[in-house]
Image (cartoon, rainbow, N blue to C red):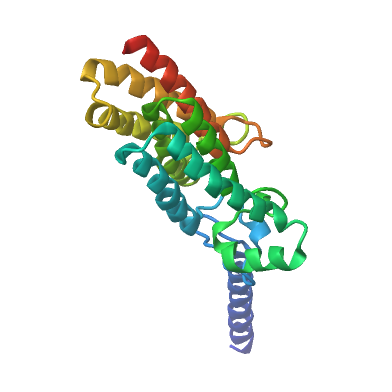
Amino acid sequence: MQSTHLDSTFGSGVRRSRKSIRSARRAATPNLTHLTPQPYLDPIREVKRESIHWKRKLFHVLGIGTAGFAYALINVGRWEAAAILGAIAALFVFLDGLRFFVPALNKKVKKDFGPLMRDYELDGLSGSSWFLISAVLAVAVFPKAAAYLGIIYLALGDPLASFVGVRWGRIRMPGGKSLEGSAALFALCSVVGYVLLTLLAGLTPAVALPVALGTGLAAAFAEALPSKRIDDNFVVPLLTGGVATLLLNVFV
């Protein structure tokens, strides 16, 4: 009886030890899927593209989306809009670059805007700077419809592609982006483009459809480019706007 009691006690201790080891392993394994970075708690450098960056996604949609829809809906000329955006871009890019020469400013930026930053923005210009530069060029060079399509596609499509890619992406393309995320971006941008081209640009459905599909494909291609040296906030508006200009010249 004493031996049986000892065996039972020993077996219970082993099971508790195994359970403790499993719990420790789970606690030690970070789950970045729904991570929202918090300054001083989660290092910004650990928040990469593999995480769903909710605060950044919201800022992306609201900030860039406001610029795109404002340009689409407000009766403002190309050069007037380019001048306004250019002034904003010049100030923002100057301050963004200045932080690399003023450590105190860089520290404050990381503290105040850490929840909106990714790791790769710590050593280079932020995505917002690249977007503003791209937006100024797009507005100055492309017709109005082409420019606001590129900006709005970036605002709505990029966060969706990231979300779908992290949650359901299985097929990886060169550079690491997922085919599922790119497909979601293409579908959303094509629908949004069709609606905007028919309601705001006054195109007939027969003309709006191929332009919407072509620009949606261009946006998906630009967002999925494997180059890590060029920010997609810079590429998407310009490539999409260029394709939109070409298609509008062909079909209109």
Quarter of the image containing the N terminus?
bottom right
- Please identify the quarter of the rendering in which residue 146 is found: top left
Q: Residue 14's x, y, as percent?
A: 63, 75
Front residue (pair 163, 135): 135
Q: Residue 233's x, y, as percent?
A: 54, 40
Residue at x 38%, y 48% (from the top left corner): 66
User: Is residue 188 visible to us here?
Assistant: yes
User: Is residue 177 visible to us here?
Assistant: no
Residue at x 34%, y 24% (from the top left corner): 212
Residue at x 60%, y 47% (from the top left corner): 90
- Please identify the quarter of the rendering in which residue 206 is found: top left
Q: Is residue 182 above or below residue 212?
A: below
Quarter of the image containing the C terminus?
top left
Q: Which residue of the protein is positioned furthest toward the bottom in this rendering?
A: 2
Say whether residue 120 is left or right of residue 240: right
Front residue (pair 95, 42): 95
Q: Is residue 159 above or below residue 174?
A: below
